């Protein structure tokens, strides 16, 4: 599938600094979001980016501050709700 995106010139200039290919920048952004959201598996993400090994994917993810299984805001909210329930039931030590 081919996707076209219109960018303001200023944004395009910033995103392509250091001679980066805007198509690659976009592809990497999609891959990162797909991986973070769990929509793409590590294997699918690796193939999308054209990496031969999981090691290459791990290095890419690390360089973009993406951590597998990272604790999300949703995780925090779920844990807070669990603590509220446990506290209301008197199951938490003081």
Image (tube, rainbow, N blue to C red):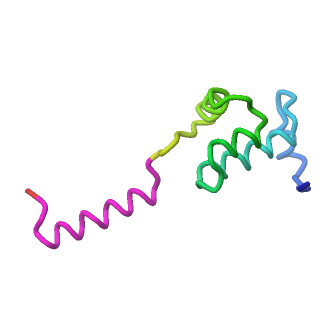
| Residue 80 in the image, given as x and y percentages of width and height | 31, 62
Is 73 located above or below residue 43 in the figure?
Answer: below
User: Residue sitting at 58 percent across and 32 percent down?
Assistant: 62
How many numbered marks, from 0 up? Answer: 0
Can you give x and y, in whole percent of width and height, for residue 61 in the image? 62, 35
Report which quarter residue 78 is drawn in.
bottom left
Residue range corresponding to the magenta coloring: 71-92
Q: Is residue 10 left or right of residue 71?
A: right
Residue at figure coordinates x 44%, y 48% from the top left:
71
Q: Quadrant of residue 64?
A: top right
Magenta region's main secondary structure? helix
Question: Foreground: 94 or 36?
Answer: 36
Q: Percent position (x, y) of residue 56?
A: 67, 27
| Residue furthest out toward the left | 94
- Classify residue 23 as left or right of residue 41: right
| Left or right side of 79 for 38 | right
- The quarter in which the N terminus is drawn is bottom right
């Amino acid at each position: 599938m081919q996707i076209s995106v219109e960018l303001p010139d200023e944004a395009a200039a910033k995103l392509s600094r250091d001679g980066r290919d805007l198509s690659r920048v976009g592809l990497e952004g999609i891959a990162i979001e797909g991986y973070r959201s769990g929509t793409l598996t590590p294997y699918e993400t690796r193939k999308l980016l054209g990496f031969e090994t999981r090691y290459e994917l791990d290095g890419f993810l690390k360089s973009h501050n993406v951590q597998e299984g990272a604790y999300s805001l949703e995780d925090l909210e779920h844990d807070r709700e669990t603590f509220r329930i446990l506290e209301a039931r008197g199951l938490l030590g003081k």
